[in-house]
């Protein structure tokens, strides 16, 4: 775990320095729809993120250098991505397939939060994605408030990486309602908007999901 | 003195015209929302437009027009074959794409017909699909005309404003 410790300490440095000196999140967005790529790119730019947009899961893996060319475990090199946002329904490799591939990676790539976007409010789909390690599931069309909330969450996570890991562990270990009193969970739940599901355990978000139908 | 008075009167009448145009634009935009052509997502897009990206809404909507026209062509082709050989999965996939992009720009009525269309695909209901395709073409044509009118009004207003400032 010593290697893991080193990586965690390096994380704040992964934030890109913009010309103004402020730390910027670098987001990789994946969507096969031209219209949606344009919108997500703008949503992210206006939220002061550095954006790279690609049209498929295959391209995303190529960009990350995960398409076969083995890089060293620390070899993040020039490509530093703080967040991946991917559409679910894409021809060929779906967003779910991409999520799985990333989470199967060793080292830093597995640590990159992946958010799934979908126009379809299907609970089994949402559950599958969260179980596979998706950070969040956003209903399309994605709003500015979704991106802002996500950005805040990721920025907080970049600094408090240890706490975040703690949250994930408690969520997966104990699915009973009594585990909801974990200190991290309350901050996550309080920042929920109606178009995302951060925790599959939260009944209020699930019911608001259903009412959107 | 008279020259200055004349200039001032011209300025005032230009401002009246601009005010009138602004009012008309607001009324027209309002009507599009009231009649369900546009929904809140269109507002969301407008929020993303600023000085750094002043043509954003027009650009996205233009992409939508191109995308929609391509998909409508493909749908026509997919449904023009012998009824027994209609590939409903393919049709559904195409409608899904159109539903997505219309939803992304707030074209509510187009999106709604897409939802009905997908139900017909699921039921493998040929007549329903053909009917839906006709409806979508109509709704698309309507929203396209209305958005083009809206953009034209905005452009004229912008030009009129520009002719006042000194």
Image (cartoon, coloured by chain):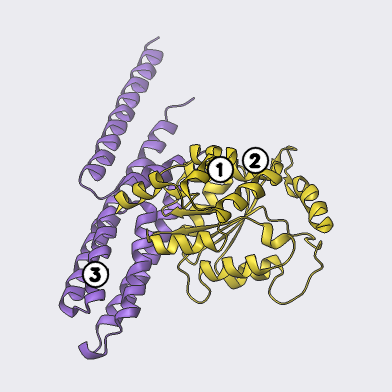
Q: Nearer the viewer, residue B2 or A209?
A: A209
State the image coordinates of residue A75 (x, y, percent, origin top left): 81, 63
Residue A112 relative to residue A180: left or right: right
Q: Which chain is purple?
A: B
Q: Which of the labelled discs sits on residue A46, or is there none?
A: 1
How many C-alpha atoms fall within 10 Å of the one at disc 3: few (<14), some, or many (≥20)? some
Q: Judging from the image, what secondary structure is the residue with disc 1 in?
A: helix
State the image coordinates of residue A127 (x, y, percent, origin top left): 46, 60
Q: Which of the labelled discs sits on residue B119, or is there none?
A: 3
Q: Nearer the viewer, residue B71 or B8?
A: B71
| Pointer 2 residue | A156
**Pointer 3 and pointer 2 on the same chain:** no
For marks 2 and 1, give the one nearer the viewer: 2
Along the polypeptide, which appears first: circle 2 or circle 1? 1
Q: Judging from the image, what secondary structure is the residue with disc 3 in?
A: helix
For marks 3 and 1, give the one nearer the viewer: 3
């Amino acid at each position: 775990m010593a290697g893991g410790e080193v990586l965690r300490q390096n994380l704040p440095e992964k934030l890109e320095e913009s010309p103004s000196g402020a730390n910027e999140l670098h987001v990789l967005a994946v969507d096969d729809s031209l219209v949606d790529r344009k919108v997500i790119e703008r949503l992210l730019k206006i939220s002061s993120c550095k954006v790279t947009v690609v049209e498929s899961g295959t391209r995303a893996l190529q960009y990350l250098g995960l398409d076969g060319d083995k890089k060293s475990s620390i070899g993040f090199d020039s490509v530093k991505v703080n967040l991946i946002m991917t559409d679910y329904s894409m021809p060929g490799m779906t967003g779910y397939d991409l999520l799985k591939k990333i989470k199967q990676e060793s080292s830093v790539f597995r640590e990159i939060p992946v958010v799934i976007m979908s126009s379809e409010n299907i609970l089994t789909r949402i559950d599958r994605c969260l179980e596979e390690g998706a950070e969040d599931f956003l209903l399309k069309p994605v709003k500015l408030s979704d991106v802002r909330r996500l950005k805040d969450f990721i920025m907080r996570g970049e600094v408090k990486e240890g706490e975040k890991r703690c949250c994930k562990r408690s969520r997966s270990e104990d699915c009973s309602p009594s585990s909801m009193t974990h200190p991290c969970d309350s901050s996550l739940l309080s920042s929920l908007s109606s178009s995302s599901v951060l925790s599959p355990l939260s009944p209020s978000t699930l019911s608001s999901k259903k009412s959107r139908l | 003195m008279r020259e200055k008075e004349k200039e001032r009167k011209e300025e005032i009448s230009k401002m009246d015209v601009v005010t009138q145009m602004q009012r008309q634009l607001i009324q027209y935009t309002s009507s599009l929302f009231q009649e369900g052509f546009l929904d809140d997502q269109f507002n969301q897009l407008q929020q993303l437009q600023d000085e750094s990206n002043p043509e954003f809404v027009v650009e996205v909507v233009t992409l939508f027009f191109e995308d929609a026209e391509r998909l409508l062509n493909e749908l026509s082709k997919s449904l023009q074959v012998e009824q027994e050989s209609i590939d409903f999965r393919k049709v559904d996939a195409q409608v899904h794409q159109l539903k997505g992009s219309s939803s992304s720009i707030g074209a509510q009525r187009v999106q709604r017909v897409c939802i009905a269309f997908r139900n017909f695909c699921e039921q493998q209901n040929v007549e329903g699909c053909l009917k839906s395709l006709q409806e979508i073409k109509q709704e698309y044509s309507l929203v396209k005309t209305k958005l083009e009118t809206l953009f034209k009004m905005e452009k004229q207003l912008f030009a009129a404003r520009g002719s006042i400032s000194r």
